[in-house]
Image: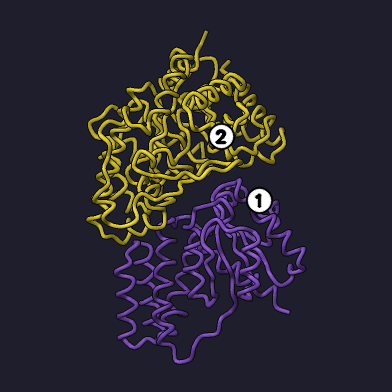
Amino acid sequence: MQVMINQIKTAYNQAIFDTDKVTALKIVHDALVGGLSPEDIVFKVVVPSIEYMSTSISQNCKSNLAQHFLTAQIAAQVTEEMISKFAIPPKLIGKMVIGTSQGDFHGLGKKIVIGCLKSQMIEAIDLGLNVTPERFVDEAIAHNAQVIGISSMMLHTARGENGCLKVRQILNERNLEHNIKIIVGGAPYRYDHHLYKIVEADAWAENGIDAGTVIAKLIEETKP
Amino acid sequence: MITAMDRLIAAANGKKADRIPVFCNLLDQGAKELGITLKEYYSKGEYVAEGQLKMREKYGYDNLWSLFYVGKEAELLGCKNIIYSNDGPPNVGHMTIKKPDDIHNLEIPNDILGHREFEETLKCIQIMKRETGGKNPICAYLTAAMTMPALLMGMEKWIDMLLNGPFDLRDELLAKTSDFFRKQLKAYRQAGANIFIYSNPFGSTDFVSMKLFDNLSMPWMEKDLRDIDTSGVVYYCGGARMNPVINKVIEKLRLSTFYLSPFDNIDEGMKTIAGRALGAGIINDLMLVDWTKEEIRTEVKRMLDAGMKSDKFFFGTLVMPLSIPDENIRAMLETAYEYGRYE
């Protein structure tokens, strides 16, 4: 069985690297017909593929945006399909709300994060674009989310007064900082790796693929 | 007296003028210079030209920009809403393409020069040309066929269509955006611009795999640039790295200037170019907001030490956010002038 899973994993990873969605989905569906359980498809093929992509980014920088996009898109699609076939409904690790900062209308990074989180059993509530600081906090409370994700494509929306700094201020004023953590991401943070500290976030992720691991850690930190 | 244009031509030919060319992309700062809002500033070509001329005079760098903001191109193709901010560049607020029929119905204007949405840009170029008498390079910003759809339908929808299809619809759109690029290039050249920043993040392997670059990006770039005058066209990947593709671009597209990414290794990039083209080392200008003057000097000197091993090198900036303090802009430029001077 392990040999079969390894073969499927290798073929699936190759399809993702080739940005070939049709082949990636065929591999998954063939595996299901061949006897692999829906749980194994998610946890032994899809999730390791995200981890593999993350490793390849950190080790050789040879992955690209197209691969990240498809990794997330296919992971979300397959996970959604497989979860409906799980013997027992999966247990969620936690929840987050995510959106772009006020004045920012660039949603691709957020979309990649959401796609990857699904298979990692983290529920992501998409708040969309141009989200006010107050809404970030209100929605996090309403959904009982442990993490707020703020994506920004431009420097002024990342470090402006209506971005993460204001979200931090509201969390502080409402005494919520131990219950709700903030993660930021987007282009400005890749250009300045210390920027997340300047905007008073708890963490940042270099790309949507790596975000899942960081978010899982933040969720863990909120647990008593 | 050596002009900025002399300096650029000398560098392009591997000759030494007084110093290397220094390009600085100050855009939104022009509104601050004139004491008006960004929305007002970008409403008139006269304002943008005045802002550009004042800033060039104030800081002494070589180039002028005819670019208002990146979404301006989308307005030529039907975008009806630009969202302004007081502290950063405007955003495209209306997607021209929302459904497949919008692609079928997308019309590329034949007469860009006479188009209502080009009127202010044309005025801006004409004023700058008149005021400088051709002594300064006037830059135009043109989005490549492969990237333009992101401005018309949003990046997420475009990358989905690019990778997953429907491919006939994708190619229909690319044929139109390629036609648009070619017509824009001609219009900007006629208007008086002489440096054409060919912006294509999809021409970087940070965006697509080398396989996709070879099979899709390159063929569409070849279509963009086939049988037209490409003098002054600068290869630029919107801040994404280009070192891995430089060789292919020189061999297949014959472009003669490369505007590297701040993440490209300058030494490696210039070695790959190997005297066949002009290369620009680009500073990570987001760091200029917080860096000290000493840090700025150290970084600019490091860049010039790497790049000036080649005679075909110049210094450039990327996005130059509004929040960079004036003294840090000066520190960067003064260091580039000082260390970029030839003996």
Tag 2–tag 1 contact (CB < 8 Å) = no
Which chain does the numbered disc 2 sit on? Answer: B
The residue under the point 36% across, 82% down is A4
Q: Is residue B149 above or below residue B311?
A: below
On-image quarter of the N terminus of chain A: bottom left
For label 1, count other residues whose C-alpha is less than 10 Å away and answer few (under 14), some (14-19) or many (20+): many
* Side (left or right) of A126 relative to A26: right
Nearer to me, A113 or B34? B34
Which circle, 2 or 1, is nearer the viewer? 2
Q: Tell me the purple chain.
A: A
Identify the residue at image location x=34%, y=84%: A32
- What residue sits right under mark 1 in the picture? A195
Residue on which disc 2 sits: B28
Quarter of the figure that contains the C terminus of chain A: bottom right
In this rendering, would B258 be left or right of B169? Answer: right
Q: Position of residue B193 (x, y in %)?
A: 39, 24
Chain B's colour is yellow
Residue at image position (51%, 36%) is: B267
Residue B26: x percent and y percent? 55, 31
Q: Position of residue A81 (x, y in %)?
A: 39, 80
Q: Can residue B192 be seen here?
A: yes
Q: Which secondary structure lies at badge 2?
A: loop
Mark 2 crowdedness (10 Å alpha carbons): few <14, some 14-19, many ≥20: many
Q: Nearer the viewer, residue B38 or B223?
A: B38
